[in-house]
Image (cartoon, helix red, strand yellow):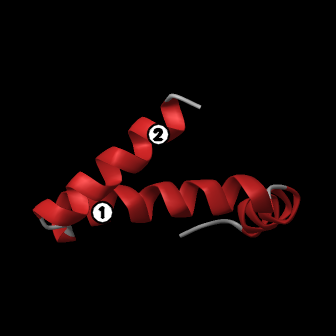
């Protein structure tokens, strides 16, 4: 069980860190997609996108 003070602290952090939360959520989605859902064509496309991004 989470205390009332902890709930308030969590809400305060969430309200102040919307961008961080979005990044954490998208990173989690990307990892899940790569690990569990992507087929070979998806992985090749992602590999190309990552390569292009790293070289720019």
Does the residue at mark 1 contact the one at mark 2 (Cβ under 8 Å)?
Answer: no
Residue carrying label 2: 52
Residue 47, percent from left and from top: 30, 46
**Lateral position of residue 56 relative to residue 5, left or right:** left
Q: Which mark is residue 42?
A: none
The 10 Å Cα crowd at callout 1, few under 14, some 14 to 19, many 20 or more, is few
**Lateral position of residue 51 relative to residue 33, left or right:** right
Residue 34, percent from left and from top: 26, 58
Residue carrying label 1: 32
Q: Quadrant of residue 24?
A: bottom right
Q: Residue at x 67, y 59 (%)?
A: 21
The 10 Å Cα crowd at callout 2, few under 14, some 14 to 19, many 20 or more, is few
Q: Quadrant of residue 18?
A: bottom right
Residue 12, percent from left and from top: 86, 61
For the C terminus, the image quarter is: top right
**Lateral position of residue 26 relative to residue 13, left or right:** left
Q: Which of the two discs, 1 and 2, labels the residue nearer the N terminus?
A: 1
Of 8 and 19, which appears nearest the observer? Answer: 19
Compared to residue 11, the image places residue 45 above or below, namely above
Q: Secondary structure at mark 1?
A: helix
How far apart marks 1 and 2 lie (CA) works out to 22 Å
Q: Secondary structure at mark 2?
A: helix
Compared to residue 3, the image places residue 31 above or below, namely above
Q: Which numbered disc, 1 or 2, marks the residue closer to the eye?
A: 2
Q: Residue at x 22, y 53 (%)?
A: 44
Residue 29, percent from left and from top: 42, 65
Q: Residue at x 29, y 66 (%)?
A: 33
């Amino acid at each position: 069980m989470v205390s009332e003070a902890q709930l308030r602290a969590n809400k305060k952090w969430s309200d102040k860190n919307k961008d961080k939360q979005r990044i954490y959520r998208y990173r989690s989605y990307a990892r899940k997609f790569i690990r569990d859902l992507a087929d070979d064509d998806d992985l090749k496309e992602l590999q190309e996108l990552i390569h292009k991004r790293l070289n720019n």
